Image (spheres, rainbow, N blue to C red):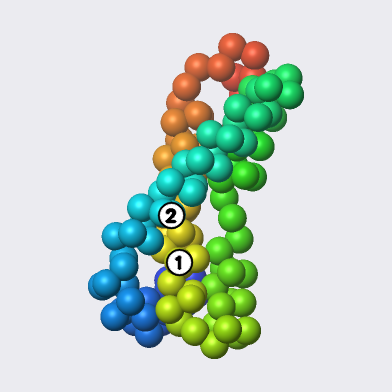
Amino acid sequence: MFGICFVIAIITARASDKLLSIGLALIAASVIHNLTGYLVGYWAARLLKLDEKDSRTVAFEVGMQNSGMASGLAINVLKSAATALPPILFSSWMNVSGSVLASFWSDSENSDDSDWL
């Protein structure tokens, strides 16, 4: 956890000027991208007749991305902290939204798979 926070702090500090100018747009894009992934993943699985447990799993797999790899590629290949900023913001949001969704689903009643978590 410390390592992740350290990397986020370094990239954010190196691209702080970009964050100040386009930060809200990046945050909005991250939220929309993440929520769309959860919704499309869940409902596509339901359309394919997967059960509730599997549909929730697909939602997480589609909604959560490997932003650590994306920021690493941006820094090492593109040599740009500004390019690494969107995955870092997405990563921060994704961890919060994923935890909230998992808590919501673990508290909700599910008639066919009540003990899936």
From this viewpoint, which residue is outermost toward the left? Answer: 20
Disc with the residue nearer the chain's start (1 vs 2): 2
Residue at position x 66%, y 37% from top? Answer: 58
Q: Which amino acid type is shown beneath numbered disc 2?
A: Ser
Q: Image height check: is 57 above or below 93?
A: above
Q: Amino acid at mark 1?
A: Pro
Percent x, y for residue 35? 47, 41
Number of the label disc, if any, that sits on residue 30: 2
What residue lies at 73% left-to-right and 24% top-to-bottom?
48
Label ID, residue 32 = none
| Percent position of residue 80, x then y | 49, 84
Dot 1 surroundings within 10 Å: few (below 14), some, or many (20 or more)? many
Q: Quadrant of residue 20?
A: bottom left
Q: Residue furthest top?
A: 111
Residue 2 visible at all: no
Q: For the point 62% across and 69% down, which residue is it?
A: 69
Residue at disc 1, secondary structure: helix
Residue 105 appears left or right of 9: right
- Which class describes the residues within 10 Å of circle 2: few (<14), some (14-19), or many (20+)? many
Q: Quadrant of the C terminus?
A: top right
User: Residue at coordinates 43% horizontally, 72% vertically from top-left?
Assistant: 85
Is residue 44 toward the left or the right of residue 34 in the image?
right
Which secondary structure, mark 2? helix
What is the C-alpha distance between the residues marked 1 and 2?
Answer: 8 Å
Q: Position of residue 27 (x, y in %)?
A: 36, 57
Residue 40 percent location from the top left of the image: 58, 35
Residue 103, above or below 84: above
Q: Are marks 1 and 2 in contact (CB under 8 Å)?
A: yes
Which residue is labeled 1 in the image?
86
